[in-house]
Image: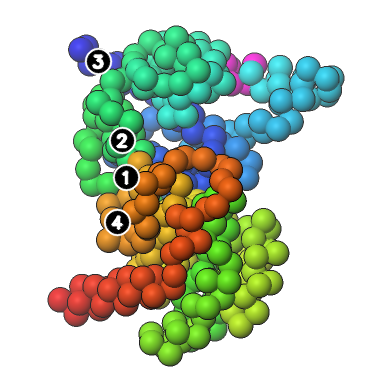
Amino acid sequence: MHHPLPPPSRILLIKPSSLGDVTHALPILHLLRKKYPNAKISWLVAPYCSGLLEGHPDLDEVILFDRRRFGTAWKNPAAGLDLIRFKRDLRRRQFDWVIDLQGLFRSGWLAWFTRAPVRIGFANAREFAPFFYTHRIPIATMEQHAVDRYLRIALAVGCEDSPVEFPFALTDSDRATVAEMTGDEPYAVLLPGTNWPTKRWPIENFAALVQPIRDRFGLRCIVAGGPDTLDLAKSIPSALNLAGKTNLPQLVALLEKSSLVIANDSGPMHIAAALGKPLVTLFGPTNPIRTGPYSRPDSVVRLDIPCSPCYSRHCSHTSCLRWLGIEPVLATAGEQLANEKSVGSA
């Protein structure tokens, strides 16, 4: 953008999902708040991710976008009426700036529908989304981490691109609830859930970590994640099972209190990375340069095989993760804990 933008009174961030993506967008929210302390900042988000944002000190408003319900508007009159009301309420807010970090047709269209005079997004966003923007921000390559792409937008709207901080909306009540669940003994959190089956390290490998983690590092293991992790957690009977038993802020508090996190490529993994926890992340079909833990390449364990990364949700052999044993994971866990100790004693 060649001309400075007029300072905004009302800003809307559009980043509805997923957990990892919402986490990655927290630094731009923080930088916007620092640059424009008096602006009213709203965030449009899916209900299942809203727990990361509700009560956030840098946000004035969370706007829930129920895509599943609104997606039935063509056949459900009640949902259709709700969608009409939603769009009308969005436009009534009279945003000065809308920043679309999702970059898809639906998010671009929502940005356009607000009639905000400044609508910002990536020049190479997908599904014709750039058609709806007034300001298109070029990025050099897609082989760039999501956080770094968002920081390009921060620079374009007059913010700094540092410090990169991930403030979470946590309360003392969230931390107290987790302390009740976990007690005082230090623990490692296992996160076996993922949204793609191909990103899932075999559950028996997670189960095989429990005893060595106790023997080598003196940590008990806790399995965590959303309701979709319930069946997986049953296959790790020797760990404390908190899968499906925490809401999002409590999951953040659980990770914050942990001594070590071992995770598939998933939303909770990105939360653990943002919290700066000792971390081991298991990668197969996805590329850690693009979607890995931000600024934490040391935490990634993967096999360098010809077909990885393939970005495929379906695979006949899943060799990239099936052939990955527990020893490289335990070795990386030891390095992560040693680094934490050396930083703590420095």
3D distance between C-alphas at marks 4 and 2: 16 Å
Q: Earlier in the sequence, mark 3 or mark 2?
A: 3
Type of amino acid under label 1: Ile
Query: In what element is the residue under mark 1?
Result: helix
User: Which stretch did the figure color magenta?
Assistant: 88-95
Is 35 situated left or right of 102 in this image? left
Quadrant of the drawing holding the C terminus:
bottom left
What residue did someone put label 1 on? 289
For residue 143, the mark is 2
Horizontal and vertical percent for residue 135?
Answer: 34, 14
Type of amino acid under label 2: Glu
3D distance between C-alphas at marks 4 and 3: 31 Å
* 10 Å crowding of disc 4: few (<14), some (14-19), many (20+): some
* 10 Å crowding of disc 3: few (<14), some (14-19), many (20+): few
Horizontal and vertical percent for residue 11?
Answer: 43, 26
Q: Residue at x 28, y 25 (%)?
A: 139
What residue did someone put label 4 on? 296
Quadrant of the drawing holding the N terminus:
top left
Q: Are marks 1 and 3 in contact (CB under 8 Å)?
A: no
Q: Relative to residue 151, is residue 223 depicted above or below?
A: below
* 10 Å crowding of disc 1: few (<14), some (14-19), many (20+): some
Query: In what element is the residue under mark 2?
Result: loop
3D distance between C-alphas at marks 1 and 4: 10 Å
For residue 1, the mark is 3
